[in-house]
Amino acid sequence: MKTEIGITTQHRRAVASELEKLLADETILHTKTKNAHWNVESKDFKDKHLLFEKQFTQLDEMIDAVAERIRMLGFYAPATLFAYLELTHLTEKSREKNDGEGFIKVLLADHESIIIILREHIKIFANELEDAGTSDFICGLMQTHEKMAWFLRSHLIK
């Protein structure tokens, strides 16, 4: 059935394409956060273990929301690791040491990168692509990433 929500097919496709990249980024960040949760070694292991667990749980919810937004626009969400690796702008850097500070720095950089991309798309989605709903949606995602980044950043202050 055709999606009739007051946005042209061309604009919906453009928004969905950007959301597919975001879905890939969120999935890669989720995997990296889960890796940190499983493999962190530090004096404050329990603290870091719980921090990473909370964050990968939040990311899991965000992943689902992004995929559902793509579906609301009338398109199918990519759902393969191959597709995510093709679409993401993040890297799968592996760490030599599994220290908490190292994991936090890598994850923080990824959150900040996603925040910048989301911020750049807020006006584009609303103004150029006439999709205020997705603009509002990614504004909320951006705020969640900002809070997650703040929590990570607070562990780096000495």
Image: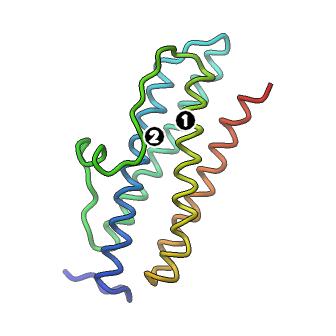
Q: Is residue 112 left or right of residue 17?
A: right
Question: Element at badge 2?
Answer: helix
Give the x, y percent position of residue 137: 52, 67
Q: In this rendered view, identify the residue nearer to me: 59 or 113.
A: 113
Tell me which numbered mark, 1 or 2, is placed earlier along the sequence: 2
Question: To which quarter of the image does residue 85 belong?
Answer: top left
The amino acid type, in three-letter code, at marker 1 is Leu
Give the x, y percent position of residue 50: 59, 26
- Res. 107 mark: 1
* Image quadrant containing the N terminus: bottom left
Q: Residues within 10 Å of mark 1 (few under 14, many from 20)?
A: many
Against 117, residue 96 (above or below) is: above
Residue at 44% x, 39% y is 30
- Res. 18 mark: none
Q: Is residue 52 left or right of residue 6?
A: right
Question: Element at badge 1?
Answer: helix
Q: Label 1 to label 2, Cα distance in Å?
A: 7 Å
* Image quadrant containing the C terminus: top right
Which residue, given by chain and number where applicable, does mark 2 sit on?
29
Give the x, y percent position of residue 11: 35, 80
Residue at 57% x, 23% y is 49
Residue at 46% x, 20% y is 95
Q: Is residue 68 left or right of residue 148?
A: left
